[in-house]
Image (cartoon, rainbow, N blue to C red):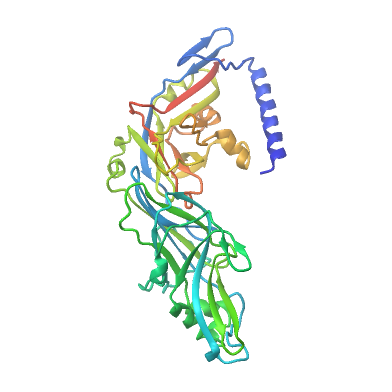
Amino acid sequence: MNFIFSINILRKASLLSVVVLSLTNCKKEDNFIGSELQNEDLGVNKLSNFSIVTYTKEADSLRADELSTATLGSMNDPDVGKTESSFYTQLRLPVDNVDFAGTGSLTDIVLDSVVLSLEYKDYYGSLDPQNFEVMEVTEDFYLDSAYYNGKSFATNPTNLVVPGSRTQIPDPNSSVFTATDSFPAQLRLKLDNSFGQKIIDESGNLTLSDNQNFLQFLKGIEVKVNNSGQGPNQGAILLLDLISLNSSVTLYYRDTASKDTLNFSLLMNTNCARVNKNKHDYSGTLIPSQLADSTLGSSVVFVQGLVGLKTEIEFTDVMKLKDSNIIINKAVLKMPVDNTAGNDFDPIEQLLIVRNENNLKYLLLDQTMFAGQAGLDNVGGQWNEDDSQYEFVITRYLNNLLNGNFPNNRLTLETISAMVTPNRSVFYGHNSAVRKPELTITYTKY
């Protein structure tokens, strides 16, 4: 983000606000007390006793292909159940006309090992042991095709990860060292040599002449986990950088004639078709009953990443302000969070609030009045750990709603980058005995 540019925008916005307030002969006070206060001289009012209804819904389906970040692993969150993430990716030759033997004989080439390396970007959850699997894909998938979350491709059922490498405790915080160099933290899975040997055996053949032919020979791999015994508060989702140069499948081999020790890497990059896949099992939680009966989302409601859940919010009586000769100076929606201490499942850092009309979603004008991060900063939605809540500024939205420019449909809270954000947030609902969502409006009469 360009910091100077953002400051200039904010200064212009502040100046504009001063001009508007001057034209309407109104002043804004910050020391309001109680749910409603009036200043007869200034005509300034504040209301916060609106009726709000909350609902939990399944998140909308999203494109799952060609993301730079892959998610892998599983976790068992007592609030939202079990989540499992996996991905498919093609592998590509780094050069055309690959011949491992060179000018020598292929019988001199001895394969020592095959390693799948995946560079870590981050993780979410608890770093407990996970059981990793790699399968060879047997179905074509394409870079120029659209694939949505939940898409599966046919695979060979044989797990290519050798037994001694299958169960690992992920370590996203430690660099990898070799005799001569160091690399960023990686998940490294040793694969069966048969996977690499069949590639070496194609040396000098049409199969290794270019990537078009190679992808007919090796369509790709699926990387997933098998953690059937995972208990509550266990497990994590790993975020991996698939397009890093450190993410590859590397064949380590020797030329017994020349005595050279060599390696050859199959690449994962932006030319590879890549598809993420997320699954959610809500068994044993409140969520199945809420999804079956939306009226049950009165005590707690949920937003969950990885295309899990969204929260819908209905203002049932805000239209009582329509045609009442008011201008809303500020409107703030507060969504309190049930942030249970003692687990590794933190709330979502940044939420998005959208309005719905004719089966389409629209960003609020409070966000689109500024571009990029400045718009997000203006509308809010950042996790406030101190107050255990999110706040959204929806001033322009409500003014347009009362002026009849939008229908009074439900607003939706969802996560940004939902295909690669594993966090979740648990909100207190409208009938919670602890805290409730609150809409506060400051307005002036004219």
Residue 107 screen position, x and y as percent = 52, 91
Relative horizontal placement of residue 250, taking residue 288 as reference (left or right): right
Q: Residue at x 38, y 70 (%)?
A: 163
Which residue is the extreme one toward the top? 41
Q: Residue at x 45, y 20 (%)?
A: 48
- Compared across the picture, whether 27 is left or right of 115 comes to right
Front-most of residues 265 and 441: 265
Classify the position of the C terminus by image quarter.
top right
What x and y, as percent, mark residue 176? 56, 62
Tally of numbered tags? 0
Q: Which residue occupies the extreme front position in the image? A: 179
Percent of width and height locating residue 305: 44, 47
> Would residue 154 be seen by someone viewing this image from the given angle?
no
Q: Is residue 441 left or right of residue 154?
A: right
The one of 199 and 427 positioned closer to us in this rendering = 199
Q: Is residue 392 above or below residue 29?
A: below
Occupied quadrant, residue 157: bottom left
Residue 392 shows in this picture: yes
Residue at x 57%, y 17% (from the top left corner): 30
In the rendered image, residue 370, in percent from the top left (x then y), is placed at 63, 37
Query: Which quadrant is home to the N terminus?
Result: top right
- Relative to residue 177, is residue 231 depicted above or below? above
Task: Tell me which residue sits at (65%, 22%) in the image.
Answer: 20
To which quarter of the image does residue 327 belong? top right
